[in-house]
Image (tube, rainbow, N blue to C red):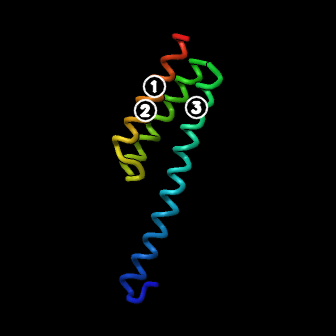
Amino acid sequence: MANTSQSKKRARQADARLTVNKARRSRIRTFLRKVEEAIASGDKSAAETALRTAQPELMRGVTKGVYHKNTVARKMSRLSSRVNSIAAA
């Protein structure tokens, strides 16, 4: 447990960051789930709109330090290729 005043403050800051980042991660996962559901339903227009709304949330996760930029780039690439493959099928 923290003993000094500085370490106590750091523990408080870490708790605050944890709750904010947990909320951000949950929000991003919700947007990704909506894209996945639209892809599973086979509705290309719904999948495209869901992907378009999920993209800024993912990028915001990068700028806020929740996700690494390459992780988000990989997720976006894979999701967009799956959305584009709906029309081919």
Q: Which quarter shows the C terminus?
A: top right
Q: Marks 1 and 2: in contact by CB < 8 Å?
A: yes
Give the number of callouts.
3
Q: Which mark is residue 31?
A: none
Residue extending farthest to the bottom is 3
Residue type at numbered disc 2: Met
Residue type at numbered disc 1: Ser
Marks 3 and 1 sit apart, C-alpha to C-alpha, by 11 Å
Instruction: Residue at 52%, 57% (x, y): give it.
Output: 22
Tag 3 residue: 36
Marks 2 and 1 sit apart, C-alpha to C-alpha, by 6 Å
Crowd rating for badge 3 (residues with CA inside 10 Å; few <14, some 14–19, many 20+)? some
Tag 2 residue: 76
In the rendered image of this protein, does residue 24 appear above or below residue 36? below
Instruction: Residue at 50%, 35% (x, y): give it.
Output: 54
Residue extending farthest to the top is 88
Q: Earlier in the sequence, mark 3 or mark 1?
A: 3
Helix, strand or loop at label 1? It is helix
Q: Earlier in the sequence, mark 3 or mark 2?
A: 3
Crowd rating for badge 2 (residues with CA inside 10 Å; few <14, some 14–19, many 20+)? some
Query: Which is more toward the observer, 3 or 60?
Result: 3
Instruction: Residue at 45%, 22% (x, y): give it.
Output: 81
Marks 3 and 2 sit apart, C-alpha to C-alpha, by 12 Å
Residue type at numbered disc 3: Glu
**Could you tell me residue 49's position as x and y percent?**
54, 25
In the rendered image of this protein, does residue 69 appear above or below residue 81? below
Tag 1 residue: 80
Helix, strand or loop at label 3? It is helix
In the rendered image of this protein, does residue 43 appear above or below residue 31? above
- Would you say 16 lies left or right of 71 here? right
Crowd rating for badge 1 (residues with CA inside 10 Å; few <14, some 14–19, many 20+)? some
